[in-house]
């Protein structure tokens, strides 16, 4: 099946700093989502971005499908950004319906 | 109100008990999914359903069963719970029709299940 690798696995930032999280995947995809899992375990949809670039406030994401990677940018980080960020993909092969998740990047933003 | 609602939010039970986790949605989506998350890992698919009459096994279906009572309701059962089924369980829905339609998945808040 498709493989998803996220980097870095852990990241500590000072409040106000910027960061870039990366997601590499091993095959072509027709669905890619970024999620934020908060300390209470809730999964928050950040972006649905199988290709292209999107922005939502301080967050933006870019997926280069032909090169099989996606990037999540967090600018001017806040303590509420802490948590685990997951990339999940659905490969474009016939009969593949599940989202395959990476292991996540654990972000800690300190004041 | 949440679009995807899971009940209960937390459950502690004993080995051998039968457990049912429930999921309901108001998004009008045909597709529903159950995932589990173990500590330090991403989510893995247990079962998925494209409509009331279409239920399919996912990556890790052993020890689980599901029921799609209506378009809006999808339940997950553990017939005889065991400790290694302790995990965080998520229900999700997505729109679209046909086998190649891809729409984003929307997740409930999760059920934290502990089996002693």
Image: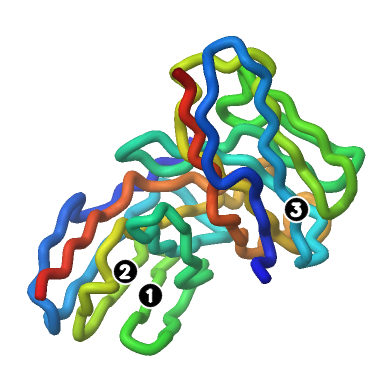
| A94, A44: nearer the viewer | A44
- In this rendering, the answer to whether B4 lies above or below B50 is below
Q: Indicate left or right for A80 with B1 as reference.
A: left
| Labels 2 and 1 in the same subunit | yes
Which disc, if any, is residue A62? 1
Return the x and y of residue A10 as percentages of the image width and height: 16, 53
Whole-Å distance between the Cαs marked 1 and 3? 32 Å
Whole-Å distance between the Cαs marked 2 and 3? 33 Å
Return the x and y of residue A80 as percentages of the image width and height: 28, 73
Q: Which of marks 2 and 3 is in front?
A: 3
Q: Indicate left or right for A7 with B114 as reference.
A: left
- Decide: few, some or many residues near mark 2? Use Cα within 10 Å; few <14, some 14-19, many ≥20: many
Q: Which of marks 2 and 1 is nearer the N terminus?
A: 1
Q: Which residue is drawn at 82% across and 59% down?
A: B97
Residue, disc 3: B24
Whole-Å distance between the Cαs marked 2 and 1? 5 Å
Which disc, if any, is residue A71? 2
């Amino acid at each position: 099946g498709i493989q998803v690798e996220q980097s870095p696995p852990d990241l500590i930032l000072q409040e106000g700093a910027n960061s870039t999280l990366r997601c590499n995947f091993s095959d072509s995809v027709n669905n890619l989502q970024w999620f934020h899992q908060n300390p209470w375990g809730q999964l928050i949809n950040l972006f649905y971005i199988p290709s292209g670039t999107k922005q939502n406030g301080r967050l933006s994401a870019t997926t280069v499908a032909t090169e099989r990677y996606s990037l999540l940018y967090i600018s001017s980080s806040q303590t509420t950004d802490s948590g685990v960020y997951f990339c999940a993909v659905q490969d474009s092969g016939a009969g593949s319906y599940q989202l395959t998740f990476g292991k996540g990047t654990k972000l800690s933003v300190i004041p | 109100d949440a679009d995807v609602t899971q009940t209960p939010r937390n459950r502690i039970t004993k080995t051998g008990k039968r457990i049912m986790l429930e999921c309901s949605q108001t998004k009008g989506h045909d597709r529903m999914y159950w995932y589990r998350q173990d500590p330090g890992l991403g989510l893995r698919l247990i079962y998925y359903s494209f409509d009331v009459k279409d239920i399919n096994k996912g990556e890790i279906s052993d020890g689980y069963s599901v029921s799609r009572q209506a378009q809006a309701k999808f339940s997950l059962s553990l017939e005889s719970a065991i400790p290694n089924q302790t995990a965080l369980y998520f229900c999700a829905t997505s729109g679209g029709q046909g086998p190649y339609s891809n729409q984003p998945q929307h997740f409930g808040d999760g059920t934290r299940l502990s089996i002693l």
